[in-house]
């Protein structure tokens, strides 16, 4: 079969590989809609995970089940499914501790395009199919379903990590697709003001539709100063981080009220250390906390998030700015994710 792969750091291309084999608990899936992620960009062009050779990219896909193992109970060939980007080993001790994304090791629940071939192949392998697949609801556009794989669960995880409560004033740093889903997640959890940081006009337009109340540009001065000014020096109760760099944490700590919480899901592609400003950290006594995480993954979460779309609570389809038809457009879709044109939020590739 063919797949679109990372050939090495900074290099991508089409390769031929064996069709993956199906274990007794597993499934083999043929993709029908896939999306590139900013994480693919960090992995390939920043070498953020280290060297990977001839590894098929991608971790966001809806597909049709092609084969299941003998012990799979709830899925069968022909089922249309949403495949979570994070596919934990649910029996692992870290999963039992409540951290499925770190099952078998730090970040090791993230297998596609990290520890094994991803979803940009003609077929891909899913471990523990009963626990990691979800049925694509009848009538749901698979391109919209793809937003359930990673963008919705990750953005919502930022809102969960920040423990958004009714009436909280929130800053969302970064309003690419992840930050947009964080914005929507904060609004759904009852935030009051949602001050969003980001400049792309299309992202701002959709952020407003998801509940952003104000905007700040990191190109127009320090964002902590701007947010402190907007809040008459009080700062915000919570911060979601879905963009920026290692230096963003210094700003997030400064814009936070005492006792505030930072929920961070940004994948830091470079830089060795995060600096915490001593004074804004209350000389170590501020009760401010930083909670960061890879999204949890798995079937239950996918089913619940898909149910929110079906119930009309949220429309992640607003983020699909670039639609391609045909597997051959994979490279184009990934490159536009890298270059981030002003009208881009999220590309999706439909495959016949
Ligand atoms: P985008 O690149 O589309 O969005 C990044 C956002 O950050 C944009 O709004 C951008 O503004 C803004 N930004 C850029 N530089 C700065 C800065 N210096 N200060 C403040 N804001 C800045 O990314 P995605 O939404 O696709 O992904 C966000 C992050 O989430 C990525 O790092 C991705 O790898 C990660 N991720 C994490 C996962 C997890 O499980 N934890 C899963 C999936 C993704 P502008 O409008 O100007 O472009
Ligand atoms: Zn991703």
Image (spheres, rainbow, N blue to C red):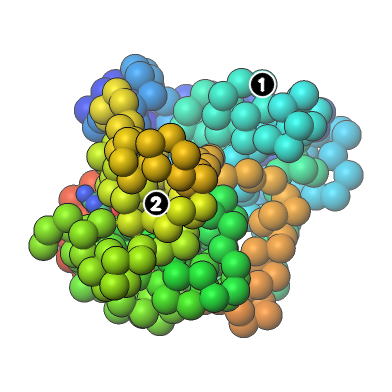
Q: Residue at x 66, y 21 (%)?
A: 104
* Residue 80 shown left or right of residue 4 in the figure: right
Query: Whole-percent x and y of residue 179?
Result: 40, 60
The answer to whether residue 231 is above or below residue 12 is below
Which residue is disc 2 drawn over? Answer: 241
The answer to whether the beta carbon of the residue marked 1 is less than 8 Å from any atom of ligand 1 is: no
Q: Residues within 10 Å of mark 1 (few under 14, many from 20)?
A: some
* Residue 294 shown left or right of residue 331 in the figure: right
Q: Residue at x 33, y 31 (%)?
A: 274
Whether residue 320 is visible here, answered yes or no, is no
Query: Whole-percent x and y of residue 177?
Result: 39, 60
Q: Residues within 10 Å of mark 2 (few under 14, many from 20)?
A: many
The answer to whether residue 219 is above or below residue 19 is below
* Residue 191 shown left or right of residue 343 in the figure: right
Question: Which secondary structure lies at badge 1?
Answer: loop
Q: Residue at x 63, y 55 (%)?
A: 82
Query: Whole-percent x and y of residue 98?
Result: 73, 37
Q: Quadrant of residue 246?
A: top left
* Residue 313 shown left or right of residue 242 in the figure: right
Q: Quadrant of residue 225?
A: bottom left
Foreground of the two, 26 or 65: 26
The answer to whether residue 212 is above or below residue 133 is below
Q: Residue most toward the left?
A: 220
Would you say the residues marked 2 and 1 are in contact, meaning their CB atoms lie under 8 Å apart? Answer: no
Q: Residue at x 38, y 41 (%)?
A: 281
Which is more N-terminal, label 1 or label 2? Answer: 1
Foreground of the two, 17 or 215: 215
Which residue is disc 1 drawn over? Answer: 104
Foreground of the two, 61 or 197: 197
Whether residue 184 is visible here, answered yes or no, is yes
Question: Which secondary structure lies at badge 2?
Answer: strand
């Amino acid at each position: 079969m063919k797949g679109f792969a990372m050939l090495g750091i900074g290099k991508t291309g089409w390769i031929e590989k064996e069709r993956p084999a199906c274990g007794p608990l597993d499934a083999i899936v043929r993709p029908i809609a896939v999306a590139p992620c900013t994480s693919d960009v960090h992995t390939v062009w920043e070498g953020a995970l280290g060297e990977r050779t001839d590894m098929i990219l991608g971790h966001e896909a809806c597909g049709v089940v092609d084969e299941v193992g003998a012990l799979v109970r709830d899925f069968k060939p022909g089922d249309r499914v949403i495949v979570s980007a994070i596919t934990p080993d649910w029996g692992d001790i870290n999963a039992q501790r409540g951290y499925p994304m770190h099952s078998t090791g730090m970040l090791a629940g993230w297998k596609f395009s990290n520890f094994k071939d991803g979803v940009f192949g003609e077929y891909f392998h899913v471990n523990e199919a009963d626990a990691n697949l979800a049925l694509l609801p009848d009538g749901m556009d698979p391109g919209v379903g793809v937003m359930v794989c990673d963008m919705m669960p990750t953005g919502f995880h930022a809102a969960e990590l920040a423990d958004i409560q009714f009436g909280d004033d929130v800053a969302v740093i970064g309003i690419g697709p992840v930050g947009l889903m964080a914005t929507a997640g904060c609004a759904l959890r009852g935030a009051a003001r949602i001050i969003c940081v980001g400049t792309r006009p299309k992202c701002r337009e959709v952020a407003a539709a998801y509940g952003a109340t104000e905007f700040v540009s990191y190109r127009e001065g320090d964002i902590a100063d701007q947010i402190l000014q907007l809040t008459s020096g009080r700062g915000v109760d919570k911060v979601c981080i879905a963009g920026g760099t290692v230096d963003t944490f210094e700003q997030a700590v400064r814009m936070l009220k005492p006792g505030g919480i930072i929920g961070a899901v940004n994948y830091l592609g470079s830089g060795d250390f995060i600096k915490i400003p001593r004074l804004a950290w209350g000389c170590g006594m501020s009760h401010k906390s930083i909670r960061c995480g890879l999204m949890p993954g798995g079937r239950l979460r996918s089913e619940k998030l898909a149910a929110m779309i079906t119930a009309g609570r949220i429309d992640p389809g607003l983020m699909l700015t670039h639609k391609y038809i045909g597997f051959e457009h994979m490279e184009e879709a990934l490159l536009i994710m890298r270059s981030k044109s002003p009208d881009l939020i999220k590309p999706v590739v439909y495959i016949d």
